[in-house]
Image: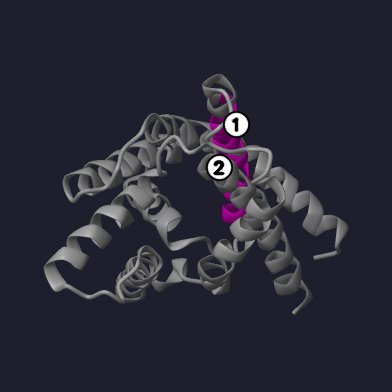
């Protein structure tokens, strides 16, 4: 039981770090991340096709996340853990918290060069936090699981697979009506490789924390 609690706490720390990165990325206001380009495209397409006024970006995000989880439950349920649900439920509130703190300092009114730096920093922080979540071995967010599962199944480096998956998200989202900005391209090209660099380091960090906790 103690081991599970420690793993969940490590996951939550990683999730908080990752969503600090996401918050910086969003506040820079230079384009949505690849997964949200897909969500945005689906949301706009479904809204027009169905005429459902109650359909929102958030509901579409949850629906796609649940679909990914359901597919994995039928194909390889070993990837779906308690952390997968925690990531899906807690991500939004964490972003809201950091937005409340940082929103007055980082916004679209900042100089373009500053926004680019904030965006790149957000991508690096996101990649670091994401690898801690992954190495907590307690589950990770549904959208991240796509690249993780494919990487494991085809035995290819995570960084490369993440780039390919992100590009697919962007392309599908763009053709469905999602908005692509320079931030989208930077995120797609930066997060995967940086995460690939952090993964072995985060694994050592997580194992060190668990050892100190006696688990």
Which quadrant holds the N terminus?
bottom right
Quick one: label 1, few (<14), some, or many (20+) residues within 10 Å? Answer: many
For the point 55% across and 47% down, the residue is 22
Indicate the position of residue 88 as horizontal and vertical percent values.
50, 68
> Are the two marked residues, 1 and 2, in contact with CB atoms closer than 8 angstroms?
yes
Instruction: Say if residue 144 shows up in the picture.
Output: yes
Q: Nearer the viewer, residue 1 or 106?
A: 106
Magenta span dominant secondary structure: helix
Q: Nearer the viewer, residue 156 or 67?
A: 67
Colour convention: one colour
Indicate the position of residue 13 as horizontal and vertical percent values.
71, 57
Give whichever of discs 1 and 2 has the lower sequence position: 2
For the point 78% across and 58% down, the residue is 210
Q: Residue furthest top?
A: 113
Give the vertical position of 162 relative to 38 (above or below): above
Query: Which numbered disc covers residue 27?
Result: 2
Q: Nearer the viewer, residue 190 or 148?
A: 190
Indicate the position of residue 7 as horizontal and vertical percent values.
70, 65
Secondary element at image label 1? helix
Q: Nearer the viewer, residue 214 or 74?
A: 74
Q: Which residues are magenta?
A: 117-136
For the point 32% across and 46% down, the residue is 154
Which quadrant holds the C terminus?
bottom right
Identify the image quadrant of residue 181: top left
Instruction: Say if residue 156 shows up in the picture.
Output: no
- Residue indicated by mark 1: 118
Give the vertical position of 3 relative to 135 (above or below): below
Q: Residue furthest bottom?
A: 1
Identify the image quadrant of residue 155: top left
Cα separation between marks 1 and 2:
8 Å
Q: Is residue 9 left or right of 157 when viewed as pictured?
A: right
Secondary element at image label 2? helix
């Amino acid at each position: 039981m103690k081991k599970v609690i420690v793993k969940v706490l490590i996951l939550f720390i990683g999730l908080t770090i990752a969503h600090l990165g996401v918050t910086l990325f969003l506040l820079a206001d230079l384009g949505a991340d690849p997964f949200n380009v897909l969500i945005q495209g689906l949301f706009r397409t479904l809204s027009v096709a169905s005429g459902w006024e109650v359909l929102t970006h958030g509901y579409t995000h949850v629906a796609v996340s649940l679909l990914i989880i359901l597919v994995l439950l039928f194909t390889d349920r070993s990837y779906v853990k308690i952390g997968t649900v925690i990531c899906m439920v807690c991500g939004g509130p964490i972003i809201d918290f950091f937005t409340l703190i940082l929103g007055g300092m980082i916004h679209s009114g900042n100089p373009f060069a500053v926004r680019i730096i904030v965006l790149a920093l957000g991508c690096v922080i996101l990649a670091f936090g994401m690898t801690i979540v992954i190495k907590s071995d307690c589950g990770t967010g549904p959208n991240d699981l796509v690249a993780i599962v494919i990487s494991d199944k085809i035995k290819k480096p995570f960084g490369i697979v993440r780039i390919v998956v992100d590009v697919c998200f962007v392309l599908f989202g763009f053709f469905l009506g999602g908005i692509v900005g320079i931030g989208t391209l930077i995120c797609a090209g930066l997060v995967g490789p940086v995460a690939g660099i952090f993964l072995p380091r985060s694994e050592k960090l997580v194992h060190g924390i668990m050892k100190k906790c006696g688990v």
